[in-house]
Image (spheres, rainbow, N blue to C red):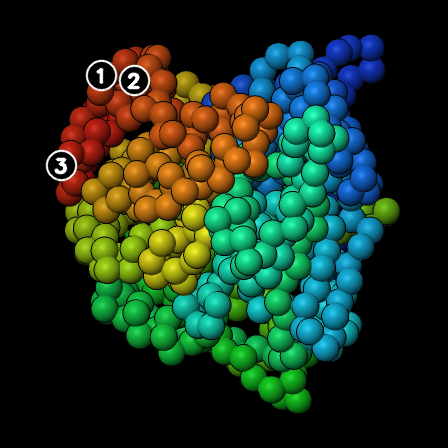
Amino acid sequence: MMAYRTIVLLIISSALANTYAIPPSSPIKCTTGTTGCTLQNSYGVWGDRKDCIASKVIYPTTQDQLLTIVADATKNILKLKVVSKFSHTIPKFACPANGDSSIIVSTENYNSNIDINVEELTVTADAGVSLRALINKVEDAGLSLVAAPYWEGVSVGGLISTGAHGSSWWGNGGSVHDHVVKIDMVVPAKQSEGFAKVLHLDATNDQLFNAAKVSLGTLGIISKVKLKLENGFKRSITFNFTDDNALEDAFTSHAKAHEFGDIIWYPSKHTAVYRHDDRVSIKAKGDGTNDFLGFQSNPIVVAKSTRASEKSLEKTKNMKGKCAMASTFIEYKKLVANGLKNNLIFTGYPVIGRQGKMQTSGSCLYSSSSDIVNACAWDPRIGGLFFYESAAIFSADTFKDFVHDVKKLRDLNPNNFCGVDIYNGLLIRFIKASTAYLGQPVDSVAVDFNYYRADEAATPRLNQDVMEEVEQMAFFKYNARPHWAKNRKIAFSKVQKKYKNFNSFMAAKTKMDPQNIFSTEWTDELLFGSKGEDYDGCALEGECVCSEDRHCSPTNGYFCLSGYVYKEAQVCRYAKSSMS
């Protein structure tokens, strides 16, 4: 327990010092003297731990350059993949195709234009513009962007492509793409059209517009995005820590009562944290900030110590130690309001601040040239946190039963959920039905949960079976849809059958990219719901669902067994583990 208190004290001292972090490294690495470049995601490791390789990388700065790139690819039958400066994605939608004809197009430098129309209440931005740059420009004009994901380390084009969202069933909802009024996209064209053209998509061309709003980088290159704005406003946030007894019945009324409400569920602690989050007048008193604890600058020594502690607990199968760690972290989050600040620190609820300071966060992204001791906690260069992130999106009418089942599983032994509670528990957010073909077809509830990932693929995890049962319960029993930018491979099983407009999306794709220039083996595998791999240990990292013991790790005592509550689940369980 003392070790965890020490870690917390170090975090507190870092927060008070108001330091910043070493900026994340570029996801693209090209080695001098070799042919080919490597693409990573921001975690440094893809789901299958295999590198993504392209023959070269191009950094356009204008739409005309994008046209030239696509025209050249169309004419010479090359493969293109677009990636942002951040590459903050887990599945391999951004990965280039295998082979010498594959090119990465980075939008890192395509970020010069942010044009605000105050009378029209809109903003038009280049695809490579960062979310923070966009929000700051909008707020400076006295306006507000209503929807944003919680993490600001994304580009405008990237967040549109992947269906990034906040939390809201109100108005147009919490998904950013549902606030888009126009998209310019560069796509292949006939020779008579110069082999490439710009499509100006809006509600007047529903089919292509609804496909482009969540396009996964498979239709063309988004060049500009026009978003609807509102007059500037503030938000008032209060976190209410309470028991989870009524969670399965209270989530609907909570979503309807609070425009930006969410719920954090810590199953091992029987605790639910209800976020009372509502807009207030721009004249309301308060200059608060949402500096979410998980996205703050962390002392590298703290991130490394936390990881070392968790690895030790995993190795010794010390569930009580994990529970002590979870309890300490949850209490600290409660103490500091999970990063909310009334001014420089948290002094009490409610925390009121401008929309631009409250809707998204990511202070660990920004650097001080003299600071070499802090970083984002998951930065792969520092040996810090390393985890999976699953994100299941339920139709609202099925979520109650999912909560019931998770509670049944939890009640067999609450300690088995301490591992997920060390991170953020189960984050519950609300997504409104969308007209985007690959957006949510009905009002939905999104559940995100992070949990420990081993340094080596062949290493099984403590309570692996519990997380696998929750994962399979979500995606197989309750037919949940995966977040396109998160999840392990098994979450995409039969995904094409979960979207009523999937065929309409594919029809638009055929029209916009008939030569499949923007498709790869990775995108096809995920879009068409691969059954998964079949090799020894494939279930350990969610590359398959186990059907044989060899898919787990029998040499380490992990065998393929049925779930406890969801009996149809096939999970890797330690032979000596117990739910009692």
Residue 176 visible, this orientation? no
Instruction: Please give the name of the residue rendered at 32% of the width and 46% of the height, measured from the top-left corner.
Output: 500
Which residue of the protein is positioned furthest toward the front in this rendering? 192
Spot occupied by residue 140 in the image (x, y as percentages of width and height): 77, 72
How much space separates mark 3 and mark 1, taking CA atoms? 16 Å
Residue tagged 1: 548
Figure check: 178 above or below 449: below
The disc at residue 551 is 2
Total numbered badges shown on the rendered structure:
3
Q: Quick one: label 1, few (<14), some, or many (20+) residues within 10 Å?
A: some
Do labels 3 and 2 touch, CB within 8 Å?
no
400 sits left or right of 538 in the view? left
Task: Find residue 94 and report its horizontal and vertical position in percent.
Answer: 58, 32
Residue in view at x 61 percent, y 45 percent:
158
Location of residue 398 in the rendering, given as x and y in whole percent from the top left corner? 23, 55
Q: Secondary structure at mark 1?
A: loop
In the rendered structure, which disc, 3 or 1, sits on the residue that comes first in sequence?
A: 1
Q: Secondary structure at mark 3?
A: loop
Q: Are marks 2 and 1 in contact (CB under 8 Å)?
A: yes
Q: Amino acid at mark 3?
A: Lys
190 or 266: nearer the viewer: 190
Dot 1 amino acid type:
Glu
- Where disc 2 sits, the SS reads helix
Q: CA distance from mark 2 to mark 1?
A: 6 Å
Residue 61 higher or lower than 203, as above or below: above
* Marks 3 and 2, how far apart at CA: 18 Å
User: Which residue is label 3 attached to?
Assistant: 567
